[in-house]
Amino acid sequence: MNKFTIIRFIVGIVLSSVLALFLHIYALSYVNSIIGKMMANIHILHPDQYGFKVTFFAYLTLLIPASGIAFLYYFTGKDLPFNSRIVKGILLGIFLLLVKGDLIRQPIMDYLVGNPIIVVFLQHAQVWVYNLAITIVIALIVPFKNKSLINSTQ
């Protein structure tokens, strides 16, 4: 990486983060008052109350992010370090959690807004476990894109 590329890399990270956080805070302050009024008398189901319909759609819609992860692994899995598919799956899971903000950012923010550290750990541990489970299974099953096929057809 040359100096210009590194500067663009850093500027891209900083500008996108500042813009995203500005929009998040603005939207949060504007929308929370509206949502609070709308949700005042509405009961939200908890996991022990979900029933078949909610559980069915939870399984069905999880196919969408799992598909995205499978495609990502198909195109990048060969380039991940290590030969072990389990380690590649763990690494993919860590990257996924980092990108989504679930590995470090969200636990820190949840703690800073007042959640006890044990609550933060328990809430995020289940997110970490299911994301790692998805990525490990995908890494064990999904093949890599064969780069030699691309070169031979051009």
Image (tube, rainbow, N blue to C red):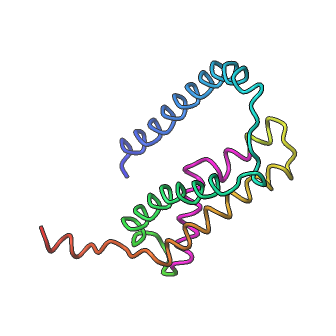
Q: In the figure, residue 106 lies in which quadrant? A: top right
Q: Is residue 24 magenta?
A: no
Q: Is residue 100 magenta?
A: yes
Q: Is residue 55 left or right of residue 140?
A: right
Which residue is farthest front?
52
Which residue is farthest left?
154
**In-front residue for pair 62/94:** 62
Q: Is residue 108 left or right of residue 148?
A: right
Classify the position of the C terminus by image quarter. Answer: bottom left
Q: Is residue 142 left or right of residue 134?
A: left
Q: In the figure, residue 37 lies in which quadrant? A: top right
Task: From the top left corner, tell me how far across and down residue 96 is, in percent.
Answer: 55, 57
Which residue is farthest bottom?
84
Q: Is the residue 47 above or below the residue 142 in the image?
A: above
**In-front residue for pair 125/5:** 125
Q: Is residue 104 left or right of residue 94?
A: right
Task: From the top left corner, tell me how far across and down residue 14 is, in percent.
Answer: 51, 35
Secondary structure predominantly adopted by residues drawn in magenta: helix
Q: Residue at x 86, y 53 (%)?
A: 118
Task: From the top left corner, tell me how far across and down residue 11 is, in percent.
Answer: 45, 35
| Magenta stretch, residue numbers | 85-107
**In-front residue for pair 148/43:** 43
Q: Residue at x 61, y 47 (%)?
A: 101
Q: Residue at x 39, y 72 (%)?
A: 78
Task: From the top left corner, tell me how far across and down residue 113 is, in percent.
Answer: 80, 35
Q: Please state the total of marks drawn on the protein image.
A: 0
Q: Is the residue 115 above or below the residue 29 in the image?
A: below
